[in-house]
Amino acid sequence: MAWLDRGLKQRMVGALVLLALAVIFLPILFTREDEVRQVVVEAPPMPETPPAPRVELEPVAVPEPVILPEDLQPSTVIAGTSAAVAPTARAASAAVAGTTPKTPAANPVPPPAQAKAAEAKAAQAKMAEAKAAEAKVAQAKMAEAKAAEAKAAQARMAEAKATEARAAQAKMAEAKAAEAKAEQAKMAEAKAAEAKAEQAKMAEAKAAEAKATEASRLDANGLPVSWSIQLASLSSTANAQDLQRTLRSQGYNAYIRHVEGMNRVYVGPVIERAEANRLCDQLKRQHNLGGFVVRFQPERG
């Protein structure tokens, strides 16, 4: 018996421990919040409670009591019947006294039909509010869509205008560049023509000057004006011829002219007076001959 009592006690203790664990952990398992999924429900605001309908009380005509004969009156009256007839008797006595009985005020209790009507009105109000909210959201979305389309259209128009403006500017720049090139080409042609004309004029002027200079360098016989260096005027023909041979051996063009019984020895002729002066200085340094420059006169006869 003691052993059985001990086993029963152990079983009871184990059952109590399990029951305590269940009491502790079951509420935690069933009441912990779901951390992964959170559902947010946006409910429309609660509509206002409709006002209670007003109940109008109408006076009811109470019939006058009828006095029954004594043989018909029951000997015993039930307590509820007497209680129910008591107001009637009072009303009758009041009617006999010439006054109207006062009906106690009843609490305005809406019938089931009115409650259903109120519920229907509340449901209709909720639906109307929901539809109005949906309509507002739809209108807002349509307004946003229209605004976005308008902005996109304005952006496209601005881009098109900018493209047209750039194209027009490019065309104007090309036209201006073409005009500038044409103007430059015209100016270059005009300058080239002017330069050619100037060059032609200068060439003509130079040719005229050359002709005039050449004409001025001709003497009366039509021969070019030239210069010679007279080195000596000797009376001896032999001496004059010896000087001539000496000068010719050195490369000078020496010649003799007989003028008034004298033999004049010349070197030349040369076209330029400056060349004649240089040749005169050279002969003076090399042969110590003090000559001078004279006009070349061709030999007559």
Image (spheres, rainbow, N blue to C red):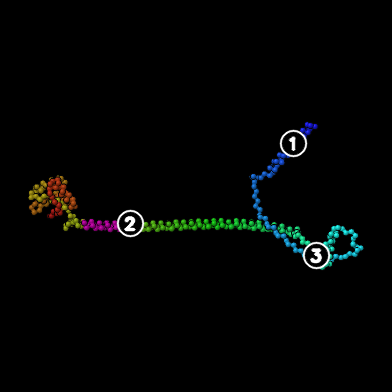
On the image, the x and y values in percent for residue 23 come to 71, 41
Q: Nearer the N terminus, badge 2 or badge 3?
A: 3
Q: Nearer the N terminus, badge 1 or badge 2?
A: 1
- Badge 3 amino acid: Pro
Q: Quadrant of residue 246?
A: top left
Residue occupied by mark 3: 101
How dense is the environment of label 2, judged by Cα within 10 Å: few (below 14), some, or many (20 and up)? few
Badge number at residue 192: 2
- Badge 2 amino acid: Ala
Check the picture and name the quadrant holding the N terminus. Answer: top right
The prevailing secondary structure element of the residues shown in magenta is helix
On the image, the x and y values in percent for residue 281 come to 15, 48
**Circle nearer the viewer, 2 or 3:** 3
Disc 1 from disc 2: Cα separation: 130 Å
Name the element at disc 3: loop
Residue occupied by mark 1: 13
Indicate whether residue 170 is drawn in magenta. no
Q: Residue furthest front?
A: 97
Q: Residue furthest right?
A: 71
Disc 2 from disc 3: Cα separation: 138 Å
The magenta segment: 190-213
- Badge 1 amino acid: Val
Residue drawn at 46 percent across, 56 percent down? 166
